Image: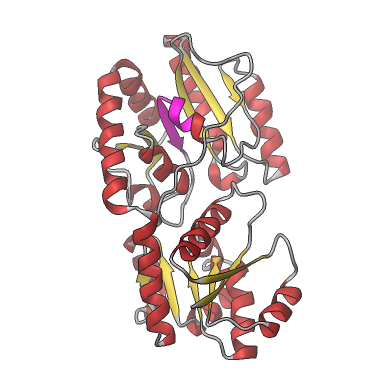
Amino acid sequence: MNITLITPYYHPPVRGNAVTARRIERQLRAAGHGVTVHALDAAPAEEILRRIAADPPDLIHALHAYLGGRVAREAGRATGIPYLVTLTGSDVYEALEDARRRDTLAVLRDAAAVAAFHKCVRCRVLDHHPSLAETMAVIPQGVELPGEEFEWGEERFEGGEFVFFLPAGLRPVKNAAFALGPLAELHREDPRVRFLLAGPILDREYGAATLEAMDRHPFARYLGEVGRGAIGALFHRADVVINSSIFEGGMANSVLEALAFGTPVLASYIDGNRSVVKEGATGFLFRGEREFLDRARDLLRNPALGRRLGEQGRELVRERFSPERETEAYLDLYRRITGA
């Protein structure tokens, strides 16, 4: 089967859509299928449409309904090729609620199939748009461990520091500055506490404000954008991985990767995080600064608790979130759409 992937982001390979697109691409190729990737951060929509018309695939798979999906819909209307869409958080929690609603709904209604990472996302969409029930499928994300070729520099955290790590691009939805307040209080209680933040600056104003806030806390360190070949070292070294997002489109890649490394997760109480972080089993969920501080303190004071949560998280990923399982689910959907 020849499949075209349309993704809003492919470069750099650290954004969630890029990580997902590259993983699906690799797995489809490994399964013997032809894959062409068109990224909107590398070519305009008009050029992508021209390329698809010149070399039509059997199927178009778009990541992100509003961005990738609109191009897939135009390509499908021009060529008759069926397309499917994998939903993201900004589709479900923003685009379907604001001025982008009409375009996003048109993409979903014309799609041969719509994939969500978790049933909570499917339910949220169907609560508002029940007509999509026949085409919506749930396909959990797979996990591929990133590399660990990270250059630590002078500060290697080998003196017994307790490291909280937040991997996230700096934009408002990721809420990266949230952890500074409670971690500052925890640092006053125990000076071993450190906070690491790694990710590209995706919103200049928010990024500047976050870095300014971090500068006021000597225990906090911004590592900039860390590539896929290196960021695994941070997951491996961290004592706790934080996700403080306001919303996620299912399970975040960073949360799954943390669990795959056996690192406990401290995550905001949102649909996407609740889909994989089970309270007291694979991590903890928080609803505000006080709960964050209480759970962070528990993990700091009880290393055995963190080890138990991490091991149970690693086992969960092994059982439910393999990339091979994800790919086979997509291939089943592809075959159903194309009749192959």
User: Is 314 located above or below residue 253 in the figure?
Assistant: above
Residue at x 35%, y 82% (from the top left corner)? 134
Q: Quadrant of residue 189?
A: top left
The answer, for residue 313, to whether it is visible in the render is yes
Asked whether residue 47 is drawn in magenta, I would say no
Q: Residue at x 46, y 83 (%)?
A: 112
Residue 287 appears anywhere in the view: no
Classify the position of the C terminus by image quarter: bottom left
What residue span does the magenta drawing correspond to? 234-243
Indicate left or right for 167 with 239 as reference: right
Foreground of the two, 126 or 280: 280
Measuring 32% from the left and 63% from the top, which residue is drawn there?
119
The percent coordinates of residue 132 (x first, y second) are: 40, 79
* Residue 222, position as x, y percentages in the image: 62, 27
Residue 125 spot, x, y in % from top left: 41, 69
Whether residue 240 appears in magenta in the rendering, the answer is: yes
340 left or right of 9 in image: left
State the image quarter where residue 77 is shown: bottom right
Which residue is depicted at the point 59% across and 46% down?
A: 14
